[in-house]
Amino acid sequence: MRIPNLVRIAAGILILALTGATTGCTTVRPYQKARLNDFNMRLGKTDIEKFDEGVHTYREGASGGGNGKASGGCGCN
Amino acid sequence: MTNKYLTLAMLVAALHATGQKGRPDTANHRADSPYKKQMVSRTQIQVLFAFYTQDGDHSAITGGIGTEWLHVYSPEFTITHQPDSNRSLSLNGGIDIITSASMNMISLMRSSASRVSDRFYLSPGYSYRLPKTRTRLGVNTGFSLESAYLSFPAGLSVTHTGPSGSREISASLQCYFDDLRFGRISDTYPLALVYPIELRDTSWFSIYRRYSYNLDLSFYQVINSKMQFALFPEAVLQKGLLSTPYHRVYFDDGHTERVENLPTERWKFPLGAQLNYFAGRRVIIRSYYRYYHDNWGIIAHTFQMEVPVKFTPTFTLSPYVRFHTQTAAWYFHPYKQSNTRDKFYTSNYELSALNTYKAGLSARYAPQNALSHHYFFDALTLRYSYYKRSDGLYAHILSLLLELEHVHPKSN
C-alpha cells in the first residue's frame, strides 16, 4: 500500500520537474544571469545550514534528499 | 525614395568606419588594454561556530523516559584551495564538545550532573575538471572519531554542466564504514560494545560494524532569469549493527528490560525538490520539499521556506520556517509498551510518529572587502533557530559563519 504511494508521488514530482525543464524553460544569456548568480539563489543547502541539517538527522527519522547526509559518520542515524 | 537610400548608405558607411576605427589588431589590443589576463590561485577559508542546546523527556538511553538535556559546542573549518580553474583541494575538520545528561545514565550511577564527550573529524577532498570538458570528478575520504563510534567515509562524485550553463547533473556515491565499539578515547573501558550497566551479563550483539552506502543524484535547471529548480533523488542502504547498544527498552509485562534491537538492514529513499525565485528587486523565495520513505515503516514529508530580503547589496536578512511530519517505524513503542514477543523493538522517539516545527532568522553581511593586498573578507553570517518536536523536545541553535578568501596571482 505504501510503495505505490511512494511511486505515485515520486513519479508526479519527476514528471513535473521534467515537464518544467523541457517545456517551460527559456534560454538565459550570460548577461541575464545577475539574479540567478545572487548568493541567495544558490541551489542546495547553504553553508550556514550545515549544523542545522545535522540536528534534523539526529532528531528525526528521515534524512537526506539534498538536505544533509542521509547516514553514516555518527552514532545517531 | 532617393533620399531614403542615400541616408541608409551614409549610415552604413559611418558605422563601417566607426567599426574599423574601434577594432585594433590583437597585439595592439593587448598592449593598450587596461585589463591584463592573469592566472590566479584562490583559497577560501570558512570557520563555523555552532552552539546547540536541547531538553526533553524521552531519552532512548533510559527507555523512552528521562531527560534529553544536551549542550553541543561545535567549531569547524573548511579550506578550499583552487590552484587553477581545473583543480580544487579541500580540507574540512572540527570538533564537537558534547555535554549530555542522558549519556551518564548508561551506568545508571550519576557521578555528576552530566557527562562530556568529544567528536573529532577530518575530511580531505580533491576534484578535477577534465580538460576541455564541463565534467568534474571528485574523491573524498576522512575519519570521524568519538567515544562510542569510529567512522571512515569514502566518496566519489561526478558533475556535468550543460553547454549553456543552465543545466547541471551530478552523481555521488558516499560510503561509510563505521565501528560502534566504545572506549577509543577513554582508556577506562576496553574496546567493546557498551551496554547499560544492568544488562552487561548478556552479549546482546555479535557484530559491531555498520556500513552505509548513499547514492546521491542531483539535477539543477535554470527555468528563466529569475527562477531555478533542483531535484535530489537519493537511495541509501545501511547494513550491520543499526541498533544503538546502550538504548534500553522496557516491556509491557512490567519487569522485562532489554537492549534496543533493530533489523540489520535499512533502505531509505529520500526525494528532495527545491525552487528558488527572485521576486522583485530585493526579495528571494527559497522553497524546499522532501518526500521520504524507508523499509522500517517511516514515511515523512518536510517543507521549508526561506525569504531572504536584501536591504542593501551587502546586507541580507532571511527569516525562515520548516515543518516536518513522519509516521512511526514499525518497531517503535513508548516506555513499557513493547511486547516481549516482538522480534524488533525500540523506544527511541526519533523513530516515533511526530511533527517538528522550526523557525529562525539569518543575517548575512557580505562586504567582500580587501583586508590586505591578497586577503578578502567575504562574509559574516549569523543564524538562530528554534526547534520544537511534538513529543515536547525543544532546542535552540546558534551558528556563526566567517568566510575569508586569499587570491594570489600566478606567474604565467
Image: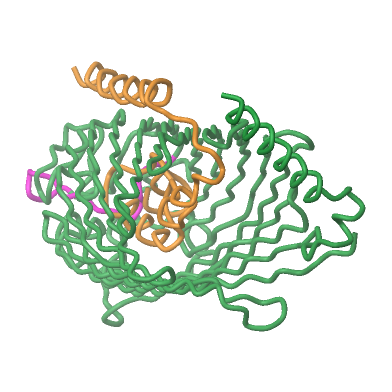
Chain colours: A orange, B green
Q: Which residue range is magenta in the image?
A: B241-256
Q: Position of residue B67 (x, y in %)?
A: 18, 68
Q: Position of residue B351 (x, y in %)?
A: 23, 44
Is B335 on the left-hand or right-hand side of B19?
left
Q: Which quarter of the image is occupied by the C terminus of chain B?
A: bottom right
Residue B99 in view of the camera: yes
Q: Which quarter of the image is occupied by the N terminus of chain B?
A: top right
Q: Position of residue B25 (x, y in %)?
A: 89, 48
Q: Residue at x 29, y 53 (%)?
A: B247
Q: Residue at x 63, y 27 (%)?
A: B5
* Of B227 and A13, the residue lying toward us: B227
Residue B98 in view of the camera: no
The answer to whether A6 is drawn above or below residue B400 in the figure is above
B251 falls in the magenta region: yes
Q: Splitting the image into 4 quarters, where does residue B272 fall? A: top left
Q: Splitting the image into 4 quarters, where does residue B173 fall? A: top right
Q: Residue at x 65, y 61 (%)?
A: B80
The answer to whether A68 is drawn above or below residue B229 in the figure is below
